[in-house]
């Protein structure tokens, strides 16, 4: 079997409401989704959800190769980006091709990927994550009632701009999940997408922890700030989760060495091989791992085969336009199917016919770091919330210096 070519597609995730974080929102709820399809001479094609930046240069590393040699082909792709570097969307392109190759390998073996990778249990524990910072209280409750109806008893909210608002919204979701769980205490997490300084993080989380428990605080400071994450971890009770924006094992090393991360995260867009390697690194330090992304399909399969998987992010319960996935959610878990490969199918004609494209990216997008991120004293700055209240109650000892993502 040989790799013969690739195709790229662009579709969207339609949330039907605003979605975003401390950095901004997609007001219309339309989020771009890129797809890479890798073809072989035996008629088996693999699918990877992710960007296709510099794909011609990266694809040259795998063209004509046997797709079943996935891990060595992953390293070949990394070597092809040696001089320019593999960070950001280039790493995402490598991840998309890598995921497609794993899909091909499992299809060729006639097995679901979770089985091929050595998984025993097709159930993958999940938590709800609504990208919900732009929702009203009523909208927030309604969204998490839907998650709760699928058995989810843990939730991660977006926040970071207003202590009182975060505390209030966490309490609303806590009550929804407690009622659905017949009094069982739910798990709560808060994600601020790199919006704080170290002292802001400690002050904000400590205030929230006076009235409720948090499982983790996610990306409290900039992604590469090992000393900062460690300082935050020492100052609060909650675990510190980070890693979704780290592109390569070399970026995890300083965080782990500094004792700066308690929950090691990997984004679905970075691919299956990256997840497996980062999970092994984390396991060597007795750290749990948690995949990030909108139904991180490839990583769900891989999560069944690693000993330190904790829980996986569930965002929208619906797949992107023109994409179908052969798994479902029940009793608080993704349940993977027996379909060979990833169990992902793409309707290319529907995607082209829909011709659904997101609006051009603006400064209000959660993918654009606000000009004053880390220096914002009032919610309402940068267009996230109209409420004019302090982000943190500052005193003469509080640092306010520069220190974000979806």
Image (tube, rainbow, N blue to C red):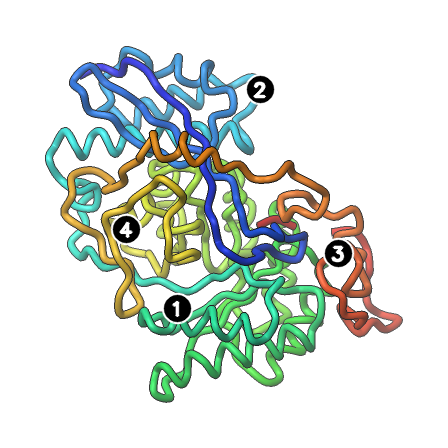
Viewer-proximal residue among 327 and 312: 327
Q: Position of residue 339 (x, y in %)?
A: 16, 43
Numbered disc 4: secondary structure = loop
- Which of the two marks, 1 or 2, is nearer to us in this view? 1
* Residue underneath mark 1: 147
The quadrant of the picture occupied by the N terminus is top left
Numbered disc 2: secondary structure = loop
* Residue visible at 50% across and 75% down in the picture: 141
Q: Where is residue 57 in the image (x, y as percent from the top left)?
A: 47, 14
Q: Viewed as shown, does residue 362 lie left or right of 14?
A: right
Viewer-proximal residue among 324 and 312: 324
Residue that extends furthest to the front in the rendered view of this protein: 353
- Which of the two marks, 3 or 2, is nearer to us in this view? 3
- Which of the two marks, 1 or 4, is nearer to us in this view? 1
* Residue underneath mark 2: 84
* Residue underneath mark 3: 383
Label 4 crowding class (10 Å Cα cut-off): few <14, some 14-19, many 20+? some
* Residue underneath mark 4: 306
Q: Earlier in the sequence, mark 4 or mark 3?
A: 4
Asked whether the residues under the numbered discs 3 and 2 touch, taking CB atoms below 8 Å apart as contact, a structural biologist would say no
Q: Distance between the residues labelled 4 and 3?
A: 41 Å
Q: Which of marks 1 and 4 is nearer the N terminus?
A: 1
* Residue visible at 20% across and 38% down in the picture: 341
Asked whether the residues under the numbered discs 1 and 4 touch, taking CB atoms below 8 Å apart as contact, a structural biologist would say no
Label 2 crowding class (10 Å Cα cut-off): few <14, some 14-19, many 20+? few
Q: Which of marks 3 and 2 is nearer the N terminus?
A: 2
């Amino acid at each position: 079997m040989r790799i013969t070519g690739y195709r790229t597609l662009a579709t969207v995730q339609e949330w039907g409401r605003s979605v975003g974080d401390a950095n901004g929102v997609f007001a219309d709820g339309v989020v771009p989704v890129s797809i890479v399809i890798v073809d072989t001479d035996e008629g088996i094609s693999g699918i990877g959800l992710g960007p296709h930046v510099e794909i011609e240069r990266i694809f040259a590393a795998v063209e004509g190769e046997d797709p079943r040699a996935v891990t060595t082909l992953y390293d070949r792709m990394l070597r092809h980006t040696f001089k320019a570097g593999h960070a950001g969307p280039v790493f995402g392109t490598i991840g998309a091709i890598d995921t497609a190759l794993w899909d091909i390998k499992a299809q060729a073996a006639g097995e679901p990927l979770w089985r091929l990778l050595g998984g025993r249990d097709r159930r993958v524990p999940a938590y709800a994550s609504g990208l919900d910072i732009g929702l009203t209280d009523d909208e927030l409750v309604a969204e998490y009632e839907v998650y709760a109806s699928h058995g989810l008893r843990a939730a991660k909210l977006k926040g970071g701009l207003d202590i009182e608002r975060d505390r209030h919204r966490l309490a609303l979701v806590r009550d929804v999940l407690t009622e659905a769980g017949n009094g069982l205490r739910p798990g709560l997490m808060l994600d601020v997408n790199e919006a704080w300084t170290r002292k802001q993080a400690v002050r904000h989380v400590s205030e929230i922890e006076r009235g409720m428990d948090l499982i983790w605080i996610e990306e409290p400071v900039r992604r590469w700030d090992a000393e900062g994450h460690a300082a935050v971890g020492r100052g609060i009770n909650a675990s510190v989760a980070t890693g979704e924006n780290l592109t390569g094992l070399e970026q995890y090393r300083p965080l782990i060495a500094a004792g700066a991360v308690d929950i090691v995260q990997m984004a679905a867009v970075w691919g299956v091989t990256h997840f497996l390697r980062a999970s092994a690194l984390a396991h060597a330090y007795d750290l749990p791992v948690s995949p990030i992304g909108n139904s991180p399909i490839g990583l769900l399969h891989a999560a069944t085969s690693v000993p330190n998987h904790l829980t996986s992010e569930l965002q929208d319960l619906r797949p992107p336009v023109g994409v179908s996935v052969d798994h479902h959610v029940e009793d608080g878990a993704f349940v993977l199917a027996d379909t060979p490969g990833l169990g992902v199918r793409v309707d290319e004609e529907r995607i082209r016919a829909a011709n659904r494209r997101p609006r051009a990216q603006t400064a209000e997008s959660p993918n654009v770091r606000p000009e004053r991120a880390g220096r914002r004293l009032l919610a309402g700055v940068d267009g996230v919330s109209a409420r004019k209240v302090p982000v943190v109650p500052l005193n003469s000892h509080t640092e306010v210096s520069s220190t974000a993502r979806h």
